[in-house]
Image: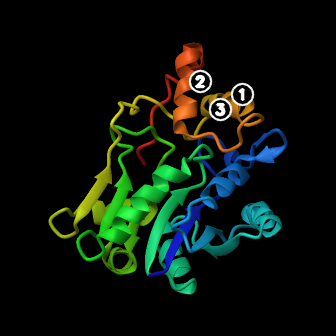
Amino acid sequence: MRVAGIVQARMASTRLPGKILLEVFGKPLLQYELERLRKIPSLDELIVATTTNDTDDPVIELCGRLGVSVYRGSELDVLSRYCEAAEQYKADAVVRFTADCPLLDPQISDSVIRYYLKHVGEVDYCAVDTLSTYPRGMDTEICSLEALREAGMEGTAARDREHVTCFIWNRPERYKIWRKQSEADWGKYRFTVDTPEDFALIREIIERLYPANPDFNIGDVITLLERNPDLLNINEMIGQKTS
């Protein structure tokens, strides 16, 4: 089974335009994330799916320098972008990542993918539970190509087209769904980059951890925040965007 990780990425973010190429230590956030994604052993292919807009040419240029595969498709119909990228790269299963998660933990993502692979035929969709027990920013979802195709053909609502897997996880009576939950209560933390405040926190974390340990994991991040609780004040007022 060929597992493709597809990262949706574009420069035209509404709350923080250009956020994925904001730099820490002279390196774009997207590069930090791609370096982490490359450490997931269960991925056979890593693809950045961006748009055909000229404004996203810098994303293509970065991927070219890093040797990462790319696909360009619709800006607003992200579901079609995923379906087309999956077909082009001959994926059997698709792992969805978003480009605003530079602290993503490869071990957590790998465990979700491996669960899916172990239970092929028993599950259609698996994800990290960032709804309650894991922090936003650890987001990882995997589904079969068949389920993604069905979403692409049948999903007509704007939310389905924008959020890719919404059609699938909104139909538990049709699709078998599993979410990886954390034993610790980490749901209060937020490690995604959507606003200037989010970026300020992520920058602090990277600057404090990366020089001594580029492979730091979520446990290292939580320990840092527990020792420096004032850091949580940086983006505590930010809510997750819902549409």
Q: Secondary structure at mark 2?
A: helix
Q: Which residue is mark 3?
A: 196
**Secondary element at image label 3:** helix
Badge 3 amino acid: Pro
Amino acid type at circle 1 is Arg
Around disc 1, counting alpha carbons within 10 Å, would you say few (fewer than 14), some (14 to 19), or many (20 or more)?
few
Label 1 close to label 2 by CB (< 8 Å): yes
**In this view of the protein, can residue 167 be seen by the observer?**
no
**Of the two numbered discs 3 and 1 in the rendering, the one whose residue sits closer to the viewer:** 1
Q: How is the image coloured?
A: rainbow
Mark 1 and mark 2 lie on one chain; the one further toward the N terminus is: 1
Q: Which residue is mark 1?
A: 208
Q: Disc 2 designates what residue?
A: 224
Whether residue 114 is visible, yes or no, is yes
Distance from Cα at disc 3 to Cα at disc 2 = 21 Å
Rendered view: 178 above or below 67: above
